[in-house]
Image (cartoon, helix red, strand yellow):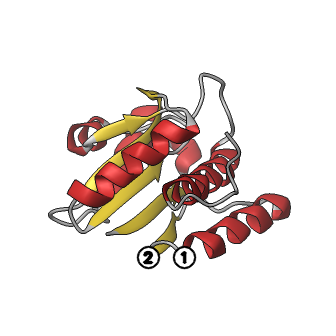
């Protein structure tokens, strides 16, 4: 199994980039992992929310191949503890297809087409975080999940 992490727009805070890079490097020890940035929509200030979601949605869906599992990081998704998330990841590894795509949408969320294609939605918290901070939180939790699966000491119960 491979993991693709799709995000909209670049990270413009160096401290977040540093943390994200640190955990991506660690993750690559466990699983083929790629984070791909979909560029911000040009002239987005002239678009309404629905138009922006549609254009971003088309770019997201263009990355999805037949057999991929699309998982949305969404405020209305299922919440997990770190241990239950690791169990969910392990189940996906045992039952999933070739690639799981996790996606952080743009500022207005996802288009109807993206929701329709998604296999599952995950919420990382009931709190709201910036789309850039979620990237770091997610890659850290994914790394934590793999250390739990492997019984390594990173996660202390």
Q: Quadrant of the C terminus?
A: top right
Residue at the image point whose x is 21% and y is 55% from the top: 95
- Along the line of sight, the residue nearer the viewer: 14 or 121: 121
Find out whether the residues at labels 1 and 2 contact each other: C-beta distance under 8 Å.
Answer: yes
Q: In this image, 15 relative to 72: left or right?
A: right
Badge 2 marks a residue whose secondary structure is loop
Q: Is residue 4 above or below residue 123?
A: below
Q: Is residue 7 above or below residue 113?
A: below
x, y percent for residue 55: 37, 51
Question: Would you call the spot at circle 2 few (<14 residues within 10 Å), some (14-19), or many (20 or more)?
Answer: few
Residue 121 picture quarter: top left
Q: In this image, 149 relative to 127: left or right?
A: left
Residue 2, can we see it? yes
Q: Is residue 60 above or below residue 117?
A: below
Q: Quadrant of the N terminus?
A: bottom left
x, y percent for residue 73: 47, 41
- Along the line of sight, the residue nearer the viewer: 118 or 1: 1
Circle number at residue 117: none
Between marks 1 and 2, how big is the CA–CA gap? 6 Å
- Along the line of sight, the residue nearer the viewer: 30 or 24: 30
Q: In this image, 11 relative to 1: left or right?
A: right
Q: Is residue 10 above or below residue 107?
A: below
Residue at the image point whose x is 45% and y is 72% from the top: 31
Residue 55, can we see it? no
Badge 1 marks a residue whose secondary structure is loop
Q: Which residue is mark 2?
A: 32
Residue at the image point whose x is 35% and y is 47% from the top: 71
Pick out the residue farthest to the right: 15
Question: Would you call the spot at circle 1 few (<14 residues within 10 Å), some (14-19), or many (20 or more)?
Answer: few
Circle number at residue 28: 1
């Amino acid at each position: 199994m491979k993991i693709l992490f799709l995000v909209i727009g670049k990270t413009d805070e160096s401290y977040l980039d540093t943390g994200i890079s640190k955990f991506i490097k660690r993750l690559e020890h466990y699983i083929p992992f790629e984070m791909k940035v979909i560029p911000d929509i040009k002239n987005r200030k002239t678009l309404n929310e629905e138009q922006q979601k549609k254009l971003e949605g088309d770019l997201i869906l263009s990355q999805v191949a037949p057999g991929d599992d699309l998982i949305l990081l969404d405020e209305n998704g299922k919440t997990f503890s770190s241990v239950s998330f690791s169990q969910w990841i392990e189940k996906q590894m045992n039952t999933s297809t070739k690639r799981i795509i996790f996606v952080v949408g743009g500022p207005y969320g996802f288009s109807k087409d993206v929701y329709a294609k998604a296999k599952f939605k995950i919420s990382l918290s009931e709190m709201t975080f910036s789309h850039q901070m979620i990237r770091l939180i997610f890659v850290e939790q994914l790394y934590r999940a793999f250390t739990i699966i492997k019984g390594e000491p990173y996660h202390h119960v």
